[in-house]
């Protein structure tokens, strides 16, 4: 279930297509950990996606993080 929520959050972020306000400051592994922690804390997908967009996470980075997560869990 957690994997589905993580993937849903990353997909939601991709669908937002929001241009970040600031330059990218988080590494892919930091984004992955941020999402995992957010899920543990019970944050909603929209909240996580919004927070990540404000932190400068781009659609491209979200795709990389999604691939990283899938590699770690295969």
Image (cartoon, helix red, strand yellow):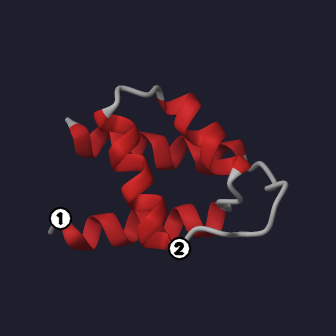
Q: Is residue 60 above or below residue 8?
A: below
Q: In this view, does 51 lie to the left or right of 54?
A: left
Q: Is residue 54 above or below residue 63?
A: above
Image quadrant in which you'd find residue 50: top right
Q: Where is residue 29 in the image (x, y as percent from the top left)?
A: 41, 70
In the rendered view of the protein, which quadrant contains the N terminus?
A: top left
In the rendered view of the protein, which quadrant contains the C terminus?
A: bottom left
Query: Residue at 65% of width from left, 60% of height from top?
Result: 57
Q: Position of residue 23 (x, y in %)?
A: 79, 68
Query: Residue at 69% of width from left, 42% of height from top?
Result: 16
Query: Residue at 54% of width from left, 61% of height from top?
Result: 62
Q: Is residue 74 left or right of residue 39?
A: left
Checking the image for residue 73, the label placed there is 1
Name the element at disc 1.
Answer: loop
Q: Residues within 10 Å of mark 2 (few under 14, many from 20)?
A: few
Checking the image for residue 27, the label placed there is 2
* First in sequence: mark 1 vs mark 2: 2
Name the element at disc 2.
Answer: loop
Tell me the mark number nearer the camera, choosing from 1 and 2.
Answer: 2
Q: Where is residue 72 in the image (x, y as percent from the top left)?
A: 22, 70
Q: Real-space Cα distance between discs 1 and 2? A: 19 Å
């Amino acid at each position: 279930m957690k994997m589905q929520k993580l993937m849903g959050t990353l997909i939601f972020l991709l669908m937002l297509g929001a241009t970040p306000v600031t330059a990218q400051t988080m590494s892919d592994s930091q984004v992955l950990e941020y999402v995992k922690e957010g899920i543990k804390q019970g944050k909603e997908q929209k909240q996580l996606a919004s927070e990540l967009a404000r932190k400068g996470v781009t659609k491209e980075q979200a795709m990389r993080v999604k691939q990283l997560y899938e590699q770690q869990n295969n």
